[in-house]
Amino acid sequence: MRALLIIAVLLLTSAVHSAVVFDTLYIIEDSIEVSTGGKLPYITFNRTTTFSQTNARLILNEGDQLELLVVNLDDIDHEFEVKDQTATYSILAGNQLSISYTFTSAGLFIFRDPMNFPDYSSVGLSGMIVVKNHSHSSFYWNIKEHKSGLNTDVLNGGTVDWSLYYPEFFTINGNSHPNINTDVSARITGNIGDTLILYLANTGQSIHPMHFHGYHVEVLFSSKSPQHVGRMKDSQGIFPSEGVVLQLVPDKVGEYPVHDHNLISTTGANLYPLGMFTTILITP
Ligand SMILES: [Cu+2]
């Protein structure tokens, strides 16, 4: 009886905090501008029918039920999945599909097109679902690298030889240095003693060891290596398809660099510094 009562209370508590969230993602093919000024063919999940260089992110609270409509505005058939969930859905060119998900635990989850993986995911079709259990200032990094010829091959229906993958461009939310610092959702800003939460999704195919100068961060979540939770780090390697949540509590003022410690990732077409390089800005 007592156990039943506890279960009833738990159900009631979760019902109070959770909500049904309706959202739509539009699959749109276009191109993004790379750091050297050229264009790269690209497909993204967008929040509206207008193409955006930044992939969509969906922000939920723990326990929320997501009612998601995915609309394929591309002339190519696509698929949809949330990584680590078993179901994969086919969405033919010009069609749409409603999908329901419930996220019972906080963290970071990658959604993507798994068709011919990693081809379509790598040309842009991968975004993040953030599931929160806090109200702290939060920052979001969809980190990715790009090889221009590969994107052209995928979009033309050609085959890709991944053994020849030497990416040339490196982005956070579709931007490279110095434009990352103008993305207020990406640039870490705050005051001494704040609790700042950083959500990182690696939607590329390379490992990205991110180095935080000036401060240490605590690992709150890793989809790949949960044993890292609780560790204090100044560098955190993010593996392909991994979602990581980090917490930064600044202890001093200043502007400090954050960059990918694999230094090719701080370049664009071999020019430095045009890649994954940004700064943290902390004020009193
Ligand atoms: Cu460094």
Image (tube, rainbow, N blue to C red):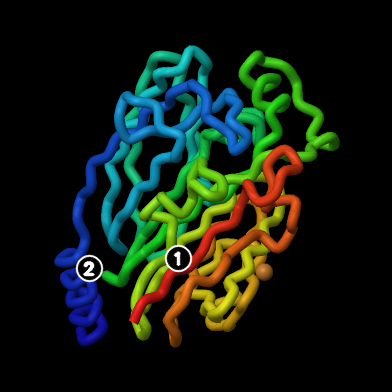
Eyeballing the image, is 72 above or below 16? Answer: above
Q: Amino acid at mark 2?
A: Ser
Dot 1 corresponds to which residue?
Answer: 198
Eyeballing the image, is 68 above or below 65? Answer: above
Quadrant in the picture for residue 207: bottom right
Name the element at disc 1: strand
**Rendered location of residue 123, percent (x, y):** 60, 31
In this rendering, does residue 169 appear at all? yes
Name the element at disc 2: helix
Eyeballing the image, is 260 above or below 233? Answer: above
Eyeballing the image, is 183 above or below 90? Answer: below
- The response on whether ligand 1 sits within 8 Å of label 2 is no
Q: Residue at x 64, y 72 (%)?
A: 235
Dot 2 corresponds to which residue?
Answer: 14
Q: Residue at x 68, y 42 (%)?
A: 268
Question: How much space separates mark 1 and mark 2, taking CA atoms?
Answer: 25 Å
The C terminus is located in which quarter? bottom left
Mark 2 Cα within 10 Å, few/some/many (few <14, many 20+)? some
Quadrant in the picture for residue 184: bottom left
Q: Residue at x 23, y 41 (%)?
A: 22
Quadrant containing ligand 1: bottom right
